[in-house]
Amino acid sequence: MTDVIEREIKIKLDIDPSQLVRNLEKEGFEYLGEEEQEDVYLNGTVKDFRDTDEALRIRVVNDKVELTYKSPKMGKDSKSREEITVNLDNKESMIKILEKLGYKSSYVLRKRRISFRKGNFTVCVDNVEGLGNFIEIEGIDVKESDLVSFFQDFKGKFHLNGEPITKSYLELMVNKLDNSNPN
Amino acid sequence: MTDVIEREIKIKLDIDPSQLVRNLEKEGFEYLGEEEQEDVYLNGTVKDFRDTDEALRIRVVNDKVELTYKSPKMGKDSKSREEITVNLDNKESMIKILEKLGYKSSYVLRKRRISFRKGNFTVCVDNVEGLGNFIEIEGIDVKESDLVSFFQDFKGKFHLNGEPITKSYLELMVNKLDNSNPN
């Protein structure tokens, strides 16, 4: 339904996520909810999204299904992409149609996400199956410099270490699988 | 949402459609409703559906939007195809995503459809913008011979002439446009 420029930064979480969740609430971050997400990533049988830096994803959250296309990354420090999303009523039928159009499921990512809001920023505490705990900060309609500045303040306030990761969870998963299959 | 084998036969209507509608009601056909449909047909920029006999359509009926993929025709006498449909919340965003995947709008068809049901058959009285009036008879999960036999009885009972048309409205529209642009 939406067609927005979404900017996001993530870091690997080196502290206990439940402690961070308590600290976020203490610091006035608004709790938005907790959900289980299943993401099916598709790739072209002709066009390879690993070469074009695009992504096509079907996300299932509870009974809700959405299809999202993500353009190649546009920024340098943060992960800025054009995103186009539609809401659907059926994951399996959408996958079947996309298969007929030359796209097929390549990876499935499952995560538990706890979300908070502060101003124009959403802070997600993510546990990603097979990858571990992360913080992902997203800004909707914010300048890249605002996101970077919010991120630096956030790291300081909550005593987090680690450099920003611009790779998506999908890319991290693909890297991990590639490394565990060295041949 | 559905994934069914749909069989259909159509003929050009050579009598007044409003008289046929009255006769259908007299003969006990159940009135299902009347609707305005807008169909956007898409075609591949790489894969040409005119060669592969497939179709990809976004249909808007009132506020409802659905995306349907139709496989190549399977039967001889009727137009039997595998159809896969999902319901969506946004036509424009779906078109944008499909453009990113290599498909673009090629034709828009608008029709007013009045539908009736009798047993496993749906009878549609269609006025198609630019093409005229048609009867389309669809059977859900019926044998091709049952559909042909229902169609023959129907023609006799309502004094209709004309041979069954296996071309889709899209194909009829494309033919018409091709003929009006002879170069």
Image: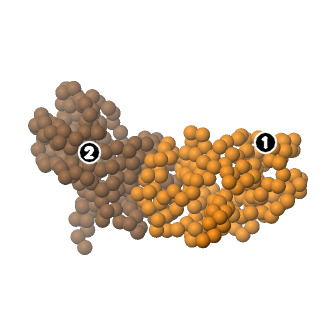
Chain colours: A orange, B brown
Q: Nearer the viewer, residue A80 or B159?
A: A80
Secondary structure under the numbered disc 1 in the rendered image: strand
The three-letter amino acid code for the residue at tag 1 is Glu
Name which residue lies at 62% across and 53% down. A109
The answer to whether residue B155 shows anywhere in this view is: no
Where does the image place residue A87, in percent across and percent down from the top left? 54, 46
The three-letter amino acid code for the residue at tag 2 is Arg
The answer to whether residue A77 shows anywhere in this view is: yes
Classify mark 1: residues with Cα within 10 Å, few (<14), some (14-19) or many (20+): some
Which residue in the protein does label 2 denote? B7
Residue B2: quarter of image: top left
The reply, left or right, for residue A162 in relation to residue B174 is right
Q: Nearer the viewer, residue B98 or A94?
A: A94
Secondary structure under the numbered disc 2 in the rendered image: strand
Where does the image place residue A102, in percent across and percent down from the top left? 44, 62
Classify mark 2: residues with Cα within 10 Å, few (<14), some (14-19) or many (20+): many
Quadrant (top left, top right, bottom left, bottom right) of the N terminus of chain B: top left
Instruction: Using the image, name the chain to which the residue with label 1 belongs.
Output: A
Which residue in the protein does label 1 denote? A30
